[in-house]
Amino acid sequence: MSEKQILLSKFLFDSASNAFDPNDSFSCGLAISLLHDSVETLIWAIVKELDAPARPQSSFEELWDSIPKAKFNTNQKSLPLRARIIELNKARVNFKHYGNLPDASDATKFLGYVQEFLNTATKEFLSVSFEDVSLADLVRNENVKKFIKAAEQEYKKQEWQNVLVECADAERESLSSLNTLFPKVDRNFRYAGDHIGSGNSSDVGSMFRYLSDYLDGLRSVSVASIVGVRLPEYIRFKNIVPSVHYSMSGVRQVQLFGTKAKVKAGEQEAMFCIRYVTRLAINVQTNVG
C-alpha cells in the first residue's frame, strides 16, 4: 500500500482547509484546486493497490472508471460520491483554466464532499481510517513529532487538557530551533531593574519585567509570521494552551488555565491545537530547515 500517497492526500486536504477564506474568492479557488488534488492523489493510491487498468495520461473520469475493472476489486465496487466529485472537478477546471472565481458556499460544500469521500474511500478500498492518518509523520524533528503523537493519543482518550499541554510543548520545541536566529530577550535584562539603586527600585524592576515580557511577545508574533502562521490562529492558540516550563532538573511544570488562558478546553479546542502545531512544525522545517 502507498502510505505516502495517503499521507500526501491528507496533507493536501489539510492545506485546502487552511487555505480556505470565505471572504476571499481566490482562496476559495485555491482550496477547490487542493481538494481536487487530494482526491486524485487518493484515487491513484487505490489504482495501485487494486491494480486498476489506468494509464498515466488517463483523464479524471477514466481514472474513476478504471476502479470497478481493477484486478483485485473482486466485487467491482465503484468509488463513492461520483456526481459530487465530478462537480468538484468541473469547479476546479472553471477556476484553473477559465479564471472563474467560486463562491464561498461552493468551497464550503466541496470541503464537506471531499472529507466524506476521503473517509469512505480509504476505509472501503484501502482498509485505512483516514481520520487516523497522522500528519505528524511529515515532521522530521523527532521531539516535536513525539509531542504531537502524544497529543493525538490524549485526544483519542478525550483528555482535552492533556492535549493542550502536549501541544504547548510541541510549539515550544518547534520554535526552539529559531532561538539562535531570533534570540529571546536576555534574562539579565528582565531583572536589570532590581539592581538599580533607587527609592523606587521595585517600580523600576516591574518596568523592566514589563518591557521584557512585551519584547518577548513581539518576538513571538514576528517568529510566527516568519514561519507562515496566521496571526488570528496564533492568538487563538496562545489563548487556549497553558504555560509549560521545565525546571533545571528537566521536570515539566504546567500552569493550567491561569489568567492567560481565556478559553475552556474542549474537543474543538483540542483538535484546533493539534492541527496548529502540526502545521507549525511543517512550516518551520519548510521555511527554516
Image (cartoon, grey):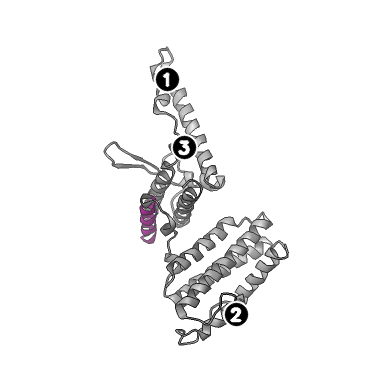
Front of the two marks 3 and 1: 3
Q: Position of residue 20 (x, y in %)?
A: 60, 57
Q: Is residue 171 left or right of residue 63?
A: left
What is the chief secondary structure element of the magenta stretch? helix
The answer to whether residue 262 is seen in the rendering is no
Examine the image and state in which quarter residue 112 appears: bottom right
Q: Position of residue 90 (x, y in %)?
A: 67, 71
Q: Amino acid at mark 1?
A: Gly
Tell me whether circle 3 and circle 1 mark residues in contact (CB < 8 Å): no
Q: Is residue 86 left or right of residue 46?
A: right
| Mark sitting earlier along the chain (3/1) | 3
| Mark 3–mark 2 distance (CA, rounded to whole Å) | 50 Å
> Image height check: is 11 above or below 202?
below
Helix or strand or loop: what does disc 2 sit on?
helix
The span picked out in magenta is 144-161
Magenta stretch: includes residue 18: no
> Image height check: is 64 above or below 2?
below
Provide the residue designation for mark 3: 181
Q: Amino acid at mark 3?
A: Leu
| Mark 1–mark 2 distance (CA, rounded to whole Å) | 72 Å
Helix or strand or loop: what does disc 3 sit on?
loop
Around disc 2, counting alpha carbons within 10 Å, would you say few (fewer than 14), some (14 to 19), or many (20 or more)? few
> Image height check: is 274 above or below 201?
below
Helix or strand or loop: what does disc 1 sit on?
helix
| Mark sitting earlier along the chain (1/2) | 2
Provide the residue designation for mark 2: 62
How many discs mark residues in the rendered view? 3
Around disc 3, counting alpha carbons within 10 Å, would you say few (fewer than 14), some (14 to 19), or many (20 or more)? few
Provide the residue designation for mark 1: 193
